[in-house]
Image (spheres, rainbow, N blue to C red):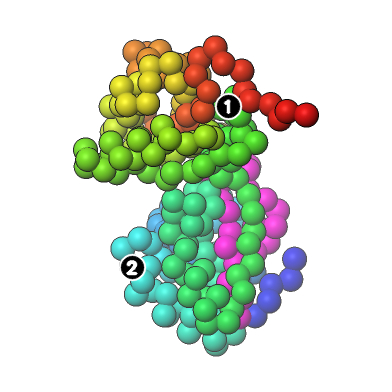
Amino acid sequence: MDIQAGTLYLVSTPIGNLEDITLRALSVLKQVDLVAAEDTRHTRELLAHFDIHTRLVSCHAFNEHARVGELLEELRQGRSIAAVSDAGTPSIADPGYCLARAAIEAGFEPVVIPGVSALTFAATASGLPVDKFAFYAFPPIKSGRRKMFFDRIAAEDKTVFFYESVHRIAKTLKEIADWIGPETQVALIREATKLHEEIRRGTAAELAANPGVLKGEFVIGIGKERSGNAPEEDSE
């Protein structure tokens, strides 16, 4: 594809298996003037794997607000920019939103280069109803806010997905069983697309008692129906 001057590209990158990158993403990363990366060290490895030598600058959660002005100036000067997170799609629980919003407000329409996402992988792999679903990003750390987080999920009428840290996954599975219900249907997706990819399904009580290997990156899916209930169907 031909790169347009003064354009921001929001580029999805692999979440594990490097072969998941799209041909369109590779074309953009090769041709843009610079890549704004969540972690330049991580992205440098990705670019090196595909023999890409585009200039890198950092744009992460701790400098995003300050960096946005500089990147907008690059766009005004006619330079093209690819924004990437460490893995997956920018803005989906990753940096990217502030830059995209600022670009739109400044009159630059971002071009989205879609690709893999841990969220869409989990929705497909979970075995839970996903005719409609919600995404809740990461649970809060403080206990009061965590309880409110799970109370909101319990009140949902649809499947919910969220990410969780390896440091809290065991605690979270127990909280799901205690606060949403032991018979709640849960899918636990670990290390999606990576060498040790694992998908475990069962009730909250079952997974809390036997969560499997607690290493890597996790997505949790929580079904709206309880164990033994069939998914709802549209009535005629």
Question: In this picture, is 193 found above or below 44?
Answer: above
Pick whichever of labels 2 and 1 is earlier in the sequence. 2
Residue 179 picture location, percent across and down: 32, 26
Element assignment for label 1: loop
Q: Position of residue 73 (x, y in %)?
A: 48, 84
Residue 112: numbered disc: none
Three-letter residue code for mark 2: Asn
Q: Nearer the viewer, residue 111 or 126?
A: 126
Q: Disc 2 designates what residue?
A: 63
- Would residue 184 appear left or right of 23 to someone viewing this image? left
Residue to which mark 1 is pinned: 128
Horizontal side, residue 198 vs residue 132: left or right: left
- How far from the left and from the top, in percent, is residue 18? 58, 43
The quarter of the image holding the N terminus is bottom right
Q: Are marks 2 and 1 in contact (CB under 8 Å)?
A: no
Q: Residue at horizontal 62%, vertical 23%? A: 231
Identify the residue at image location x=68%, y=76%.
4
SS type, badge 2: loop
Residue sticking out furthest to the left: 143
What amino acid is labelled 1 in the image? Leu
Please state the horizontal and vertical placement of residue 8, each as a whole percent of the image. Answer: 58, 72
